[in-house]
Amino acid sequence: MPTIISIIIAVVITLVITAIVTYFATVSNLKKNADSKIGNAESKAREIIDDALKTAETTKKEALLEVKEESIKTKNELEKETKERRAELQRYEKRVLSKEEALDKKADVIEQREANFVAREEQIKQREVKVEELSKQRVQELERISGLTSEQAKEYLLKTVEEDVKHDTAKMIKELETQAKEEAGKKAREYVVTAIQKCAADHVAETTISVVQLPSDEMKGRIIGREGRNIRTLETLTGVELIIDDTPEAVVLSGFDPIRREVARIALEKLILDGRIHPARIEEMVEKAQKDVEAMIREEGENAALEVGVHGIHPELIRLLGRMKFRTSYGQNALKHSIEVAQLSGLLAGEIGLDVRMAKRAGLLHDIGKSIDHDVEGSHIQIGVDLCRKYKESAVVINAVESHHGDVEPETLIACIVQAADTISAARPGARRETLETYTNRLKQLEDIANQFKGVDKSFAIQAGREIRIMVVPEQVSDADMVLLARDISKQIEFELEYPGQIKVNVIRESRVTDYAK
């Protein structure tokens, strides 16, 4: 046991010693390695530093060389540029010197010219003095010869020239006026004819009676009723007189108010169709007829405004326009006349470049007063003006309404156009119906005026009295006398007769030679 323990102890000691030795040996080895590595690192560091120093030296030398080369290059360029600048400055100096020399030469020339001008100026002044003296001498000589002073001579010349200018001016003005009248008349006729040709309206002649056809004569007794109560009721409600005579299968409605006459006609026709004719039924039918006529009036007014293309008219004015369908003037339907005037006004306004819509509006409303002139006191012009002002029509329309018969002066061209269109519509042949007596009297008066002149053989009034043809005796009236005769007859007609439009006087001279062959 002691041996084993001693062995173990010896082994442990050996191991400890071995470990210690190993440790120290390792430490020593590591230290040597570290020292060697440090030495190597220091040597490498020195080598690197040496290399860096060498590289830096090389780079420095190269940089110095580059700088030297750059400086040399820059120096050469500067020297070259300097040489060029010097050469350019030398050229500029030469040019400046040449210019200075030229300027000096020019200055010398100018000085010479100035000297010449001064000399000439002196000569001119001397000549002006001489001319003034000669002019004075000539004026004195002319005054002595003519016996007039210069002022008197000027006055005489101005007066002579003024008279010549006045004569020439008057002649020129006369020629221009004649030319303007001819052209204006031609243009006016062209515009009017174009407007008339474009406006073609049908007219219906209205009378004071309406005829209602009956299915049989038996219906007359039913219309009259027991003791005439039916006819009295109808006449009382409508204000129209019923004429029942021997005319077969017809009843005549007579009255000056066309609207009432139309109400009576419609009511009577409905009663005839219905067959039940008694006072209560008559009252009912008259009321329905009044409503129908009122609707018809409004529709006719709207159609008239639509036909001429006028919009924005007050509804009451539209209704009054419709009433004009039942109004006539000299046999001409007032509504158709207003439509025609509106169309003519629009066409004329378009020809001369005015507002077409405003012209149509003024033409359509120019006779609006005729719709109620039976119910309101005053002329249709004043009534129309009051209506247009009441319903806020423009001043242009009001002036056109007020001036279309010449009561006031027209203030606008549209008013003049409406006046002309109204005259055209009224004066158109066939537009207005005259009584037979008036017609025949006018024709007779025309023929009597023509027959009272010496040399007139026969005279014939034709074309509703708008032309008269006069046959003259060729032995008493020559070709030259025909002109004077036509003029005298025209003047006499203008003096004695009143007529719309114009009357053409046509004088005819015919010479005949007759012989017989035997």
Image (spheres, rainbow, N blue to C red):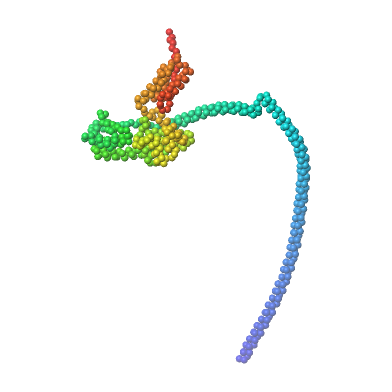
Name the residue rendered at 72%, 72% in the picture.
Answer: 42
Q: Height in image: 358 above or below 193?
A: below
- Toward which corner of the image does residue 307 lie, by quadrant? top left
**Viewed as shown, does residue 48 lie left or right of 393?**
right
Q: Give the x, y percent position of residue 180.
A: 51, 29
Q: Give the x, y percent position of residue 511.
A: 45, 15
Residue 514 seen by the camera: yes
Q: Please name whichever residue, 507 or 305, is drawn nearer the observer in this view of the structure.
A: 507
Residue 199 seen by the camera: no
Name the residue rendered at 39%, 29% in the picture.
Answer: 431
Name the residue rendered at 31%, 31% in the picture.
Answer: 209
- Toward which corner of the image does residue 38 lie, by quadrant? bottom right
Q: Give the x, y percent position of residue 297.
A: 35, 38
Q: Furthest residue to the bottom? A: 2
Q: Height in image: 204 above or below 17?
A: above
Q: Please name whichever residue, 362 or 344, is drawn nearer the observer in this view of the structure.
A: 362
Q: Height in image: 270 above or below 459?
A: below
